[in-house]
Amino acid sequence: MKTTLDELQAFVSVVDTGSITAAAEQLGLTISAASRTLSRLEEKLQTTLLRRTTRRLELTEEGAAFLLHARAILNSVDTAEEQMAARRMRPAGRLRVDAATPFMLHVLVPLLEGFRARYPEVELELNSNEGIIDLLEKRTDVAFRIGVLKDSTLHARPLGTSRIRVLASPAYLERHGTPAKVAQLEQHALLGFNQPETLNDWPLRNAEGEVLRIRPTIASSSGETLRQMALAGLGIVCLSDFMTREDRSSGRLVQLFPRHTLDVRQPVNAVYYRNTALAARITCFVDHVIEVLGKKPFEA
C-alpha cells in the first residue's frame, strides 16, 4: 500500500477542521509538515483532493470519494486495536474528554485516580470548553454537557440532574445584608453569565409571578469564575449543586430564599457520536463515572 495512515489522518483532519493550520495543531505537526503530508498523498494518488483558495479549502469530487474510504480505513484500524485490547480485557488508546471547567474540576478530576487504576492503558486527554463544541472539529470522543441537548446526531448517556440555587458568602451578607424579598436583589451585586441569557434565569419568581431573569453586575462565561467571585464576597450567584456541594456543607456559601426557590434541575449527559469506533473506551469511562457518582450523583 502506497498510502500511509499518517497521510490519511492528515487528510481527514484537514477536512474536519477546515484548514491545514488547525489540522497541524491537532496532529502536533508544523504547518509546513502537514502541508507536505497532504501534497505527498495527492502525488501518490495522482489527483487533487482539495482545492486551496485564500479563504478556505474545498473537497474535489475525487476528494469527497476518497474521504469515505479514508474514514473507513481509520475506523477499521481503531476497531482492530480496540478488539486486540478487548481480548486482554483492557481498553486501550487515547480518549479525548471535554467538559466545562466546573464539571471537569468538581466532578471528573476527583474520579480520575480510580479510573487510571482500573484502566491504565487508556490515555486520557482532558479539555475544557465553556460553550458547546463540535465533537468532530475538536476531535473529541466524549463530552459532558449540562442542560437540554439539541444535537440529535449524538448518543447521550444520562448521568442525572443537578439543582440550581441562589447563593452568597457569609462575608458578603455581613457587609451588604441578607435580602429578605426577591425584589431586594436589585439592590445587590449579582454575578451572572454573559452567554447564553437563559443561564441568568434564577429559580425564583418576580413580582409578576414569572421566573426571575437577572441582569448581572459582573458577568463571566465560566461558572467556576462566578463561584470564585462568590466565595470572595463579590456578590450573589446562582450555581448548580454539582459545583457548590462542599461550599454549602462547609458554610462557605449559604443558600438564599430556600423556601421560595423553585425546584429547577439541569440534566447532565455524556454525549458522543453513535457510530464511533471508540465505544469500549467511551463506555468504560462513562460507566466508571456513573458507578462512582452513584444513583443520585448531584443531590445535596
Image (tube, rainbow, N blue to C red):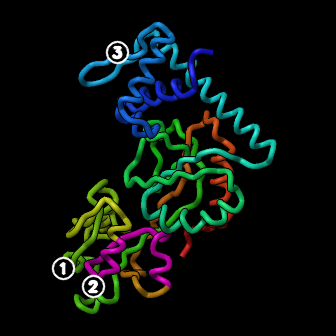
Q: Give whichever of discs 3 and 1 has the lower sequence position.
A: 3
Question: Which numbered circle lies on residue 228?
Answer: none
Question: Which numbered circle lies on residue 51?
Answer: 3
Task: Pick the residue in front: 139 or 154.
Answer: 139
Q: Helix, strand, or loop for circle 1?
A: helix
Task: Pick the residue in front: 156 or 282.
Answer: 282
Q: Amino acid at mark 1?
A: Gln
* Image height of 224 relative to 197, above or below: below
Task: Give the residue at the far top of this rendering.
Answer: 46
Q: Is residue 23 left or right of residue 221?
A: right
Q: Helix, strand, or loop for circle 2?
A: loop
Q: Quadrant location of residue 49?
A: top left
**Which residue: 48% across, 62% down?**
103
**Which residue: 31% across, 64% down?**
210
Q: Amino acid at mark 3?
A: Arg
- Residue position for label 1: 187
**Which residue: 69% across, 44% down?**
280
Give the spatial CA distance, label 3 vs label 1: 59 Å
- Residue position for label 2: 179
Q: Helix, strand, or loop for circle 3?
A: strand
Residue 157 rendering spot, x and y as whole percentages:
60, 50
Q: Is residue 282 left or right of residue 171?
A: right
